[in-house]
């Protein structure tokens, strides 16, 4: 899997799960859509990541890191409420964020190795 594919999957999961949280709630809150906004931004970054644009890839990985860290708060709240569905949603989004981060880091390392091999 490439970083671009992992980024695309992560973006789609963030949007879909965020929509599930919002539209599946009896009392929807706009804060449930925050991951969807990040997902949309990541979708916009996908062509740049696919083209191996270093700046766009770093912006995308920063967005993924922000979402991953931010999801700890709703995860803790979901555990506290005993809301199993919310726990699953938060863990699913965190898992795809972690997956995307792994593939971004792998692509950064591969690019560095390729630069070093070409330069010397």
Image: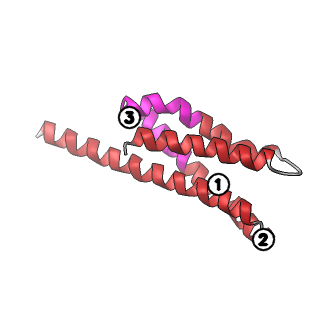
Q: Which residue is drawn at 34% across and 45% down?
A: 108
* Position of residue 59 in the picture relative to residue 76 (left or right): left
Residue span colored magenta: 41-64
Numbered circle sitting on residue 60: none
Measuring from the top left, give residue 7's x and y in whole percent.
48, 41
Residue at the image position 43 percent from the left and 40 percent from the top: 5
Q: Position of residue 81 (x, y in %)?
A: 80, 69
Q: What element carries label 3?
A: helix
- Most frequent secondary structure within the magenta stretch: helix
Real-space Cα separation, disc 3 to disc 2, in angstroms: 42 Å
Magenta stretch holds residue 117? no
Q: Is 49 contained in the magenta span?
A: yes
Q: Position of residue 27 (x, y in %)?
A: 89, 50
Count of labels shown? 3
- For residue 70, the mark is 1
Q: Is mark 2 on a helix, strand or loop?
A: loop
Are there few (<14), some (14-19), or many (20+) residues within 10 Å of tag 1? few
Secondary structure of residue under mark 1: helix
- Please identify the residue farthest to the left as the structure is shown: 120
Q: What mark, if any, has residue 54 been given in the picture?
A: 3
Q: Nearer the viewer, mark 1 or mark 2?
A: 2
How far apart marks 1 and 3 lie (CA) works out to 24 Å
Work out whether residue 41 or residue 10 is closer to the camera in this orientation and state it. Answer: 10
Residue 82 position by quadrant: bottom right
Residue drawn at 73 percent across, 47 percent down: 20
Badge 3: how crowded within 10 Å, few (<14), some, or many (20+)?
A: few
Q: Nearer the viewer, mark 3 or mark 2?
A: 2
Asked where in the image residue 120 lies, by quadrant, the reply is: top left
Viewer-closest of 42 and 96: 96
Circle 2 sits on which residue? 82
**3D distance between C-alphas at marks 1 and 2:** 19 Å
């Amino acid at each position: 899997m490439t970083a671009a594919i992992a980024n695309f999957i992560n973006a789609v999961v963030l949007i879909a799960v965020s929509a599930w949280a919002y539209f599946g709630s009896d009392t929807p809150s706009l804060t449930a859509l925050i991951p969807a906004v990040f997902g949309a931004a990541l979708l916009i970054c996908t062509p740049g990541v696919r083209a191996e644009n270093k700046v766009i890839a770093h912006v995308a990985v920063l967005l993924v890191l922000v979402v991953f860290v931010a999801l700890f708060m709703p995860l803790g709240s979901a555990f506290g409420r005993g809301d199993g569905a919310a726990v699953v949603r938060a863990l699913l989004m965190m898992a795809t964020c972690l997956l995307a981060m792994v593939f971004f880091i792998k692509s950064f390392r591969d690019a560095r190795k390729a630069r070093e091999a070409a330069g010397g």
